[in-house]
Image (tube, rainbow, N blue to C red):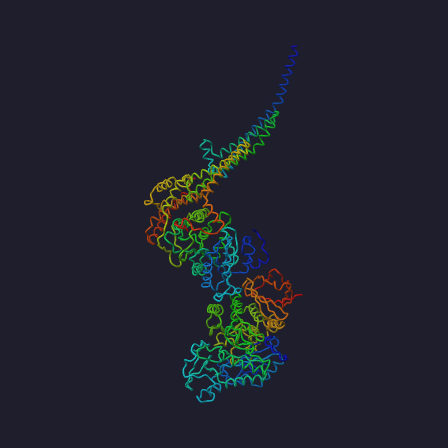
């Protein structure tokens, strides 16, 4: 809703801030921002009904700020999607100020503001990010860290790992790397990471991150560039990463630790939308950038390299095979519009394999993904349907990966992923052909 | 007597000739209008074809599944078909205008009716076209959704969705054209009602527990442990 | 003339801390003296101060700026004699200025005849006047105060072949207050000066009077008994005189020095001062409000003494380690400025000579609850000289004019008691009293006006304080109340302009009258009261219900 900016509000704002942004933020929130004033560090926290985990997350953030940024002006900003379990109140209670006298006040050199605003009544990650970006721009934050409200494994030094490179070493975007289980995050290791690496030539391990940090410069650029309509609300994290690449900004990685998130296994399709859907979409506007890149470069990383843990994990492989087969069979008409005849035939062939012989080669997988990308570009059918159609094929790929690496050690798994990435890079000309090719 | 007959004949012939002379200009006007109409209709057809090409109408109709239908009926592609339709409608309109000029009694009203009916034809075609588009979209969405949720018989579900939507669209189509309005309406009502009723029974008895859990999840903000606890998290 | 017997005069006092030695030299020997000080009383009266605190002027070897006293009942020859002192005292009283002098109770110089006697033999009658020991292991765990120079609180005396106790420099042996004779003698000393007419004493280093094994030898109950006794005698024999405690302790530990209003009248609020500096650098009021929240209530007749700087280093003893590191990094990057857990710089250089910030700090000094003390030279914004040793960098001669020796003395510049500040920013040609008295908008003129406003309202020295906690943490706002006076003070601790909304519902209906320009501001009401302040700006509003 567009609101008039009162003269009083103008007093606290610099004239170089885009005035359009003020219309997006509610009045009350802007008033709170005036009281916070200029800051050095901003921690953004998008939430909805996270009362179970938010207390420990906020405590870790607070400790992190007191430990590593005690002299910096810091604030925690919560963008809430209409929680009804008291989540915003828990976040706001983390503020350290003289009005509330508490024990840890003595540990804090400065006031720490923790404020909250409601941006809507249902989760929209893009709107949450936009709220925090707008606030960060108004407060001229030098560095912002986004933290996920359900990271139960977060530690205070995560903030230092994320923010110090931005503050001290002039990085624009710091993405995390984690100590993952070898079968955790397969959408990233088997699809998102190889694809983004092949497209943009950067070995970004976690392009879709729930914790990351960025500079004020990056935030302002992203805010200005983007048209914040319905479509672009999904997948803002991936678009953020791509924007950093496209803007030729300095990207780095830092090792954080283990990643423990509530498991939402049934959310594959929304996950695909937020990752691949966004990535395919970004390929449209960045064609000139990714079409000219070959090979890939490593990204500066602080802390340990990505690790894998090897505890046994129970997985329902039968179900994966079943869903793959069912997908290949039932969606034939859809695949006919998307895939080339040879690829489709190969997929139908492997759908006939038994579990023990099941194998979805890296080459076939890369080709599959590239053909989907090209189909998405040409919009042969509705683009969202194209993304959804990838789901059963991805499950097949997951099954193949699980079977191949059932007994593999951590270095072996890493090597497999590296091979996959190299395959994607090798087949990039194929993508370009399909992209430009037959109508 | 011969002179009477001759004079009557002459009169009759003169009447005929007069009538003819009165009629001929109108006929000529009709021909001119018809010819002009043809030219204009041709221009409109070309214009329509360019516009349709610009908005990638063929792609749209492919999505709608209309192209496949036409191909099967050995008809030309949809943009071509539509342009030709525009041509014929325009030319016919002009011809009718010309006929109107002829002044043939009784035809006025019919011609007026025709022109009044034309918008409804367009509306009906519009409904049909976008209805087919919607049917195609939603049936594919249902198919994808069913496949990804591992529901049984996804193709059946997809076809059912398409069928329901097409039935609905057809009813609207006929209603718009005013053909057997009541019949169509009642028939649709019965069919739709029956389907809904059947689904309600099925859902109610067979899916009681599912409904309960669904409602719980909506109204009480608990995150149930996923039944699929043994699946990996993709992110 | 002095108002007679106004027992609580110290609550309305504006104290000026001055050292005779570096104020004004009347006889051209390069050292300030009492005759010179007397001549400058007119300047002080113009400034508006109504009390002076004189640093030690007793005979002394001057190894600790006069705090090592060799004769309690006389005046150091360089500064004049007792007659000069008395004449000065009378002149001050005539101008309505009271005089507070130092009284170093805890220790003497090792050149004092008492100590000379005490050390000469173990049978000497003065032996027990000091704290002697065969070993240096007694009172273990007692902290060392002058960390940069002393390694122990015991010093070996080669003459007496024993150790003697000293909490400060080793040439300042501690007196033994367990000896009643010592107590009587010290009261007698105080009585000597009270009879001469001084209005009060600043009792130096009072926490350390007594020692007991197994304690930290500070703030012991025995010390309070002694002090209470002095106070009782003072009230009986010299009503209306004042005792000011110098005790660098946390506020909770300072509270006992007020007792029930029967010990000290005033005490320095040491922990507040570094936090004021921290507040303006952090641009956050949290350090200031928190220390005042922790400050206990004191009896109605008692008063805190507030100050920004003094003759010592800006002490960072009463702050946490994080705070101390921060203060060092922002105020004393150059390590030579650091001394004994403190920073040895003057007010103006600490604040980078930012006039607005200097005004803000003085504004807070004058409006927070307590009696303010102005350190000589800070009213004109004098600078410091870190190249002088110890704390001498903040004890340079007063700069009176742009002429010979800055108007301090007619002696040769090389023979002055301390070198003048010469650099173009703070040197006497740039910063001097004469130029500033002639300039209506100089710092001196501003201070004069500020003191006048402060003195116009009794609420500042006598009133209660209640903090407002606006969400904008850069704004320090509080309400002072006394009898029917209510004053709202709003300070912007930030170097940038700020907007703040204050909750003034309790004062609904009051019109705000800004105290310097005396213009009226909008009435307080139910809605948040919006104020905008420029960098380091502050407002004092008198609240009046018409």
Seen at 43% across and 82% down, the residue is: C155
**Which residue is situated farthest in the right direction here?**
C546
Question: Compared to C473, does B224 lie above or below?
Answer: above
Residue A127: % across, % down: 50, 51
Question: Compared to A260, does A349 lie above or below?
Answer: above
Q: Nearer the viewer, residue C53 or B157?
A: B157
Seen at 48% across and 75% down, the residue is: C387
Q: Nearer the viewer, residue C88 or A330?
A: A330
Q: Quadrant of residue A306?
A: bottom left
Residue C525: % across, % down: 63, 61
Side of A109 relative to A305 (left or right): right
Q: How many numbered callouts? A: 0
Residue B72: % across, % down: 44, 32
- Picture quarter with the C terminus of chain A: top left
Viewer can see residue C458: yes
Viewer can see residue C439: no
Question: Compared to C224, does B27 lie above or below?
Answer: above
Side of A339 relative to C92 (left or right): left
**Which residue is situated farthest in the top direction here?**
B1
Q: Nearer the viewer, residue C247 or A68?
A: C247
Q: Quadrant of residue C479?
A: bottom right
Side of B116 relative to C125 (left or right): right
Residue C367: % across, % down: 58, 70
């Amino acid at each position: 809703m567009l609101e008039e900016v009162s003269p009083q509000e103008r007093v606290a704002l610099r004239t170089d801030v885009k005035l359009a942004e003020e219309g997006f933020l509610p009045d009350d929130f802007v008033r709170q921002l005036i009281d916070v004033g200029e800051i050095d560090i901003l921690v953004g926290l998008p939430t909805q009904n996270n009362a179970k985990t938010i207390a420990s997350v906020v405590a870790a953030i607070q400790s992190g700020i007191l430990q590593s940024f005690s002299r910096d002006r810091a604030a925690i900003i919560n963008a809430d999607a209409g929680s009804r379990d008291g989540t915003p109140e828990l976040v706001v209670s983390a503020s350290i100020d003289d009005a509330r006298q508490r024990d840890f006040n003595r540990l804090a050199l400065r006031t720490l503001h923790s404020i909250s605003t409601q941006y809507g009544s249902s989760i929209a990650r893009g709107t949450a990010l936009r709220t925090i970006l707008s606030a960060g721009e108004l407060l001229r934050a030098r560095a912002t860290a986004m933290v996920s409200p359900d990271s139960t494994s977060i530690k205070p030094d995560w903030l230092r790992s994320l923010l110090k490179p931005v503050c001290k070493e002039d990085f624009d975007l710091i993405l995390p790397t984690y100590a993952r289980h070898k079968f955790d995050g397969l959408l990233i290791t088997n699809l998102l990471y190889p694809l983004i690496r092949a497209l943009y030539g950067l070995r970004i391990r976690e392009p879709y991150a729930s914790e990351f940090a960025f500079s004020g410069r990056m935030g302002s650029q992203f805010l200005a560039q983007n048209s914040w309509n319905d479509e672009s609300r999904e997948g803002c994290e991936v678009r953020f990463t791509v924007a950093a690449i496209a803007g030729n900004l300095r990207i780095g990685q830092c090792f954080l630790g283990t990643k423990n998130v509530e498991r939402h296994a049934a959310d594959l399709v929304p996950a695909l939308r937020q990752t691949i859907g966004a990535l395919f979409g970004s390929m449209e506007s960045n064609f000139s950038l990714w079409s000219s890149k070959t090979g890939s470069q490593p990204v500066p990383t602080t802390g340990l390299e990505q690790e894998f843990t090897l505890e046994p994990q129970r997985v329902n492989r039968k179900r994966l095979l079943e869903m793959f087969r069912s997908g290949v069979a039932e969606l034939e008409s859809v695949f006919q519009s998307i895939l080339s005849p040879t690829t489709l035939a190969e997929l139908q062939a492997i759908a006939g394999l038994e579990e023990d012989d099941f194998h979805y080669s890296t080459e076939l997988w890369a080709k599959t993904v590239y053909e989907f990308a090209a189909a998405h570009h040409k919009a042969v059918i509705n683009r969202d349907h194209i993304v959804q159609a990838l789901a059963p094929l991805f499950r097949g790929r997951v099954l193949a990966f699980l079977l191949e690496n059932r007994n593999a050690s951590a270095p072996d798994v890493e090597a497999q992923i590296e091979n996959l990435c190299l395959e994607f890079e090798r087949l990039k000309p194929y993508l370009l052909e399909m992209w430009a090719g037959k109508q | 007597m011969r002179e009477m007959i001759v004079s009557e004949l002459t009169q009759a012939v003169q009447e005929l000739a007069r009538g003819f002379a009165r009629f001929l200009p109108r006929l000529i006007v009709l021909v001119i209008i018809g010819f002009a109409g043809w030219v204009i209709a041709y221009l409109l057809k070309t214009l329509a074809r360019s516009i349709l090409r610009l908005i990638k109408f063929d792609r749209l109709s492919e999505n709608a599944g209309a192209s496949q239908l036409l191909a099967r009926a050995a008809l030309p592609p949809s943009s071509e078909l539509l342009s030709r339709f525009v041509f014929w409608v325009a030319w016919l309109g002009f011809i009718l205008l010309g006929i109107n000029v002829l002044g043939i009694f009784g035809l006025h009203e019919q011609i007026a009716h025709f022109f009044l009916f034309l918008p409804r034809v367009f509306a009906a075609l519009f409904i049909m076209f976008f209805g087919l588009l919607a049917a195609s979209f939603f049936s594919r969405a249902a198919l994808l959704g069913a496949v990804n949720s591992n529901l049984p018989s996804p193709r059946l579900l997809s076809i059912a969705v398409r069928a329901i939507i097409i039935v609905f669209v057809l009813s609207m189509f006929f209603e718009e054209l005013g053909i057997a309005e009541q019949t169509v309406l009642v028939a649709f009502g019965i069919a739709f009602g029956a389907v809904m009723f059947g689904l309600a029974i099925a859902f109610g008895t067979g899916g009681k527990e599912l409904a309960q859990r669904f409602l719980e999840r909506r109204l009480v903000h608990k995150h149930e442990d996923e039944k699929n606890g043994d699946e990996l998290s993709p992110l | 003339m002095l108002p007679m017997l106004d027992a609580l005069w110290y609550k309305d006092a504006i104290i000026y801390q001055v050292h005779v030695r570096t104020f004004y030299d009347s006889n051209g020997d390069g050292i300030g003296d009492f005759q010179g000080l007397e001549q400058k009383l007119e300047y002080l009266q113009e400034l508006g101060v109504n009390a002076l605190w004189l640093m030690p002027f007793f005979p002394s070897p001057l190894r600790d700026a006069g705090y090592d006293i060799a004769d309690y009942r006389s005046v150091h020859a360089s500064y004049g004699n007792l007659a000069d002192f008395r004449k000065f005292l009378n002149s001050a009283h005539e101008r309505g200025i009271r005089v507070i002098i130092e009284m170093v109770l805890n220790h003497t110089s090792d050149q004092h005849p008492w100590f000379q006697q005490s050390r000469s033999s173990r049978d000497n009658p003065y032996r027990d006047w000091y704290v002697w020991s065969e070993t240096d292991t007694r009172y273990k765990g007692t902290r060392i105060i002058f960390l940069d120079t002393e390694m122990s609180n015991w010093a070996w005396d080669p003459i007496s072949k024993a150790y003697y106790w000293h909490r400060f420099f080793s040439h300042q042996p501690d007196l033994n207050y367990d000896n009643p004779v010592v107590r009587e003698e010290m009261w007698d000393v105080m009585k000597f000066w009270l009879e001469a007419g001084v209005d009060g004493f600043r009792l130096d280093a009072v926490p350390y009077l007594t020692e007991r094994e197994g304690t930290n030898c500070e703030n012991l109950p025995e010390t309070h008994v002694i002090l209470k006794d002095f106070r009782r005698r003072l009230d009986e024999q010299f009503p209306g005189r004042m005792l000011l405690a110098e005790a660098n302790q946390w506020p909770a530990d300072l509270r006992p020095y007020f007792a029930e209003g029967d010990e000290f009248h005033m005490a320095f609020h040491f922990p507040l001062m570094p936090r004021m500096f921290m507040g303006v650098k952090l641009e956050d009021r949290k350090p200031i409000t928190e220390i005042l929240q922790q400050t206990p209530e004191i009896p109605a007749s008692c008063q805190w003494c507030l100050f920004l700087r003094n003759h010592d280093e800006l002490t960072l003893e009463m702050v946490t380690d994080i705070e101390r590191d921060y203060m060092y990094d922002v105020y004393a990057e150059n390590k030579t400025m650091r001394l004994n857990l403190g920073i040895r710089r003057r007010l103006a250089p600490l604040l980078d000579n930012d006039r607005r910030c200097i005004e803000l700090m003085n504004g807070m000094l004058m409006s927070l609850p307590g009696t303010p003390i102005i350190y000589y030279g800070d009213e004109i914004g004098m600078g410091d000289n870190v190249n002088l040793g110890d704390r001498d960098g903040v004890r340079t001669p007063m700069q009176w004019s742009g002429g010979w020796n800055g108007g301090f003395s007619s002696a040769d510049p090389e023979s002055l008691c301390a070198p003048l500040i010469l650099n173009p920013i703070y040197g006497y040609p740039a910063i001097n009293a004469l130029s500033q008295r002639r300039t209506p908008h100089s710092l001196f003129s501003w201070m004069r006006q500020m003191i006048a406003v402060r003195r116009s309202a009794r609420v500042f020295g006598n009133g209660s304080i209640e903090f407002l906690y606006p969400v904008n943490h850069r704004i320090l706002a509080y309400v002072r109340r006394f009898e029917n006076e209510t004053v709202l003070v709003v300070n912007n601790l930030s170097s940038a302009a700020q907007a703040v909304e204050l909750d003034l519902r309790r004062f609904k209906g009051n019109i705000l009258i800004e105290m310097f320009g005396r213009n009226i501001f909008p009435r307080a009401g139910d809605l948040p009261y919006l104020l905008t302040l420029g960098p380091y700006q502050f407002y004092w509003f008198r609240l009046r219900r018409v």
